[in-house]
Amino acid sequence: MDHSSVLKSYQFYSKFYIFGLNPGRSVAVKQMELKDGHRVLEIGIGTGMSLSHYPEDVEITGIDLTPEMLEQAHQRVDNLGLNNVQLHLMDAQKLDFPDHSFDKSIAMFVASVMPDPVAMIKEMKRVTRHGGHIYILNHFSQKGSFMSLIEKGLSPFAHQLGFEPLFYLDEFLDKTGMKEAQDIPIQPFGYWRLLCFKNK
Ligand SMILES: C[S@@+](CC[C@H](N)C(=O)[O-])C[C@H]1O[C@@H](n2cnc3c(N)ncnc32)[C@H](O)[C@@H]1O
């Protein structure tokens, strides 16, 4: 993946972004166990489909690279009448926030879209306070599975699709230093997984 393919794909998807039925978002936000006043960073917030799941007494900061996706998120904030959400156009691989700014940070369906997911995790670790938590919700490929054969076939079209279909869990954990992460399969199929990692 590269930035221009991401921008092109999500400028297009923003017009009819319907990846809304995935149960992972509500599972992820429940798992975050948010308390009054928590500062939450959501990376690649897209059209803001997660926003209705957050409690109103937490501070949400959402960032995204694609202006057209963020525009939809702004509209959603207005429609839902939320006053606890700030949105910024920003690259997850180079966050414009001071160290330890957030209690929790989360990226939903973003890791396999990012040109450099390792850089994204590094930045999430930097801006999340020590003892805070990092959450990654994504599809992950399992070596030897039937699904991974399909993902392998689709992988050459990643730039057109706007995400990398072949995205191995063990390689991601290894490269990002997140081997100790709790790994929660999202039902019914467990194809998407929620990784929860305590920032040291
Ligand atoms: C599949 S969408 C997921 C959107 C949202 N998280 C959701 O649950 O619907 C991926 C999003 O990641 C954003 N994105 C991709 N690369 C990014 C980067 N380097 N920095 C910030 N956002 C990025 C895209 O613009 C897009 O909105």
Image (tube, helix red, strand yellow):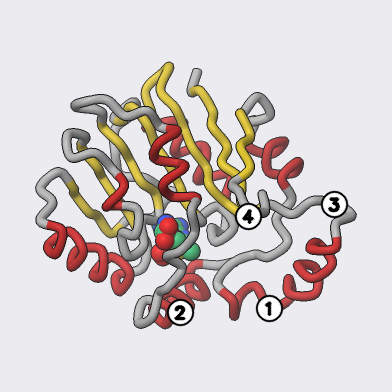
Q: Earlier in the sequence, mark 2 or mark 1?
A: 2
Task: Establish if 149 lies above or below 182.
Answer: below
Q: Amino acid at mark 2?
A: Lys
How far, Cα to Cα, is label 2 from label 1? 14 Å
Q: Position of residue 186 (x, y in %)?
A: 59, 46
Q: Residue 58, labelled with which disc?
A: none
**Cβ(mark 3) to ligand 1 < 8 Å?**
no
Q: Residue 8, labelled with which disc?
A: 2
User: Neighbour class for label 2 at 10 Å: few (<14), some, many (≥20)?
Assistant: some
Q: Residue 31: which quarter of the image? A: top left
Label 3 element class = loop
Task: Establish if 155 lies above or below 198.
Answer: below
Residue holding disc 1: 157
x 36%, y 76%: residue: 14
Q: Residue 61: which quarter of the image? A: top left
Q: Amino acid at mark 1?
A: Phe
- In front of the other: 179 or 176: 179
Q: Residue 143, labelled with which disc?
A: 3
Residue holding disc 4: 139
Q: Amino acid at mark 3?
A: Lys
Given contact means CB atoms under 8 Å apart, are the residues at marks 2 and 3 in contact?
no
How far, Cα to Cα, is label 4 from label 2? 22 Å
Q: Earlier in the sequence, mark 4 or mark 1?
A: 4
Q: Residue 57: which quarter of the image? A: top left
Given contact means CB atoms under 8 Å apart, are the residues at marks 4 and 2 in contact?
no
How far, Cα to Cα, is label 4 from label 1? 17 Å
- In front of the other: 47 or 35: 35
